[in-house]
Image: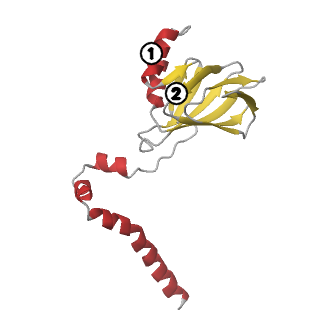
Amino acid sequence: MKRKDFLSSTAIGIGTLSFIPLINACKTESSKELINTSSTEVSKIFQKPKVVKEDDGIKLNVLGDQQIIKLTGADTNEQYTLIEQHNEPGSGIPPHVHENEDEVFQVLRGQVEMSIGDKMTTLEAGDIIFCPRGVPHSWKVVGNSKARTMLSIFPSGLETMFKELAALPSGPPDMEQVSLICGKYDLKFI
């Protein structure tokens, strides 16, 4: 087979194969509903790419945690939330547990002391920690420099809680009110 013929047949073959699941889906009753859905509803099924520049995102001060929400559940078909954090030494979140979400922290700059379960570790730039749901954890920026971290939360939804917490009056937090908000999202301080 000549190279040109091979490339043409391969491209067509790959293109055809990628549509087979969609064609098969169209034979089902539920896919007939897909044909009649609005573009907004279809975009929830087939997510669009999104470019987030360095300064883009929703900036929040969540009880002293300086966050920039980079991707929300609306961006990821409710699969995950991505948050960039910029915090001064001494900043942190006390021990808490999530009933519904797993978290992944990646330290990009600085040092972050993480407590997870009964283990304590200090993360440096490039280090990652996985915090599964149901396991108590906390974090605190240590050392002399500001920390920059990326927090991925699976599934999404906590960005709504963070927005509610950021809307609280400035000053020392009313922990009863904080606990009520967090409780709505099955997050408990311990």
Residue 31 image point, x, y percent: 27, 58
The residue that appears at 30% across and 47% down in the rendered structure is 41
The type of residue carrying mark 2 is Lys
Nearer the camera: disc 2 or disc 1: 1
Given residues 163 and 176, the one toward you in this image is: 176
- The residue identified by callout 1 is 180
Residue 110 image point, x, y percent: 74, 31
Residue 73 image point, x, y percent: 44, 38
Q: Tell me which corner region of the image, top left, top right, bottom left or bottom right, holds residue 164.
A: top left
Instruction: Looking at the image, tell me whether mark 2 or mark 1 is earlier in sequence order.
Output: 2
Q: Helix or strand or loop: what does disc 1 sit on?
A: helix
Residue 146 image point, x, y percent: 71, 26
Q: Relative to 48, say whether 163 is above or below.
A: above
Given residues 48 and 46, the one toward you in this image is: 46
Residue 55 in view in this figure = no
The type of residue carrying mark 1 is Leu
Residue 122 in view in this figure = yes
Q: Relative to 7, say whether 58 is above or below.
A: above
